[in-house]
Image (cartoon, rainbow, N blue to C red):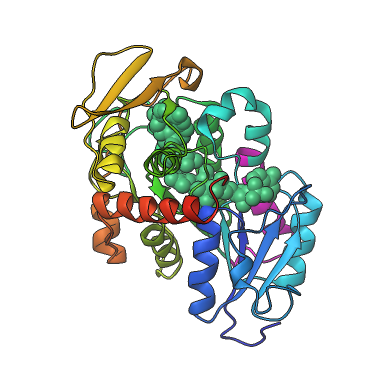
Amino acid sequence: MATGENRRVALLTGITGQDGSYLAEFLLKMGYEVHGVIRRASTFNTARIEHLYADRFTHKGGKMKLHYGDMTDSSSLVKIISGIKPTEIYNLAAQSHVKVSFDLSEYTAEVDALGTLRLLDAIRTCGLEKQVKFYQASTSELYGMVQEIPQTETTPFYPRSPYACAKLYAYWIVINYREAYNMFACNGILFNHESPRRGETFVTRKITREVAKIQLGLSECFELGNLDSKRDWGHAIDYIEAMWLMLQQEAPDDYVIASGESHSVREFVEEAFSCVGKKIVWEGEGLNEVGKEDGTDIIRVKINPKYFRPTEVDILLGDSTKARQKLKWAPKVTFKELVKNMMDSDLQLMKDNPSA
Ligand code: NDP
Ligand code: GDR
């Protein structure tokens, strides 16, 4: 374990997720000792971080260590924190799927809302509230039914899902612990960010996987829900750097992290097809939307209401002026580059393993 004044020891919850894997990679490169909380699963859940083990076969050595724990289990969090004594904690663990949160509303609150409280209390139980810097993965979903466009740190919240309501609790408990106990705790209000490591059931990754399958002749159609919602999409690699920057400041604060551009799901589909030289012409609305390539290939993008949400977030567009000025942060990857990066990766994935 690292010792002395200049210890740089990070604990990541959610290390096996999209953001956790990129952040772990980033922090290891910066010389941190990195610890991650993983939960027990009946199948392997470490695919995104396998390459970070010093020896990927024995899972030994190196500066990354994993610990079994769960956001629903306070005692595991206390044990991990007291053993490691981290200098920075990044709370990325969550039931992060908005649509699923309508089915798993209580569990989502347990993990995303109370889990955050448990983690903050575990820090206090270990007597580390004056030493640890804490990052909370807050979200643009807090804006929900948007009250102003673009959204900033002062835009009022109006959550539209059990996920967003749980994250609203987490947002406020972080601020409360900052004020009550003088903790260095920050909310990063991150807008949607994607990558080749994005979970397969989020819309961007679903689209790039399906377009890749169509391009390789492995499939002829796919289903989506609401094509008209708009999101401010950036690349996860840019966004994890902003998390780290927040914890390197003199004082804790909350920041919007966004690209400043908004695109519809429909535009994302069009851009993905254009990466493989296909042009979509949308015909009609309703159950069967049809896309044509040069009037010859017919590609069906079916609308399946099962993907609609009981309450939707129609448009998100972030203004990250504060982060740009105070953190000197700016996104580097454009919307087009993001889609291309994901398309290239999924084309390769499907070529290597058509049943992926
Ligand atoms: P992912 O869904 O890819 O990863 C979620 C992580 O949380 C996984 O490591 C998962 O473990 C872990 N997890 C879930 N439940 C528990 C639990 N009960 N105990 C411990 N760990 C748990 O999310 P992202 O990487 O995309 O997002 C990271 C965080 O940022 C999340 O909190 C998300 O809500 C938030 N966020 C994400 C945005 C985005 O656009 N990606 C935007 C704004 C906020 P396992 O691998 O075992 O499932
Ligand atoms: P979101 O991401 O809900 O914004 O939450 P998601 O990719 O799931 O949905 C974006 C938009 O696409 C529409 N949509 C579909 N969504 C999915 N998943 N599957 C479909 O088939 C489909 N068809 C259309 C949705 O209705 C929605 O409008 C993500 C998560 O990472 C959260 O954890 C995070 O907090 C926010 O981004 C910011």
Q: Number of marks in the image?
A: 0
- Specify start and end residues of the magenta stretch as a single range: 112-132
Quadrant of res 227: top left
Question: Above or below — where is 58 with respect to 106?
Answer: below
Task: Report x, y in % for residue 299.
Answer: 33, 28
Question: Above or below — where is 50 with respect to 204?
Answer: below
Q: Report the residue at 69% width, 59% height from top.
A: 37
Is residue 179 among the parts visible in the rendering?
Answer: no
> 148 or 353: nearer the eye?
353
> 287 or 102: nearer the eye?
287
Task: Report x, y in % for residue 354.
Answer: 53, 47
Q: Report the residue at 43% width, 36% height from top.
A: 203
The secondary structure making up most of the magenta span is helix
Question: Above or below — where is 279 with respect to 131?
Answer: above
Q: Report the residue at 50% width, 64% height from top.
A: 23
Q: Quadrant of the N terminus?
A: bottom right
Quadrant of res 237: bottom left
Task: Report x, y in % for residue 353.
Answer: 55, 52
Task: Report x, y in % for residue 28.
Answer: 54, 76
Quadrant of res 130: bottom right
| Apparent side of residue 229 relative to residue 310 in the rendered image (left or right) | left
- Say whether residue 101 is magenta: no
Q: Report the residue at 64% width, 88% height from top.
A: 4
Is residue 127 among the parts visible in the rendering?
Answer: yes
> 145 or 197: nearer the eye?
197
> 201 or 105: nearer the eye?
201
Q: Residue furthest bottom?
A: 4
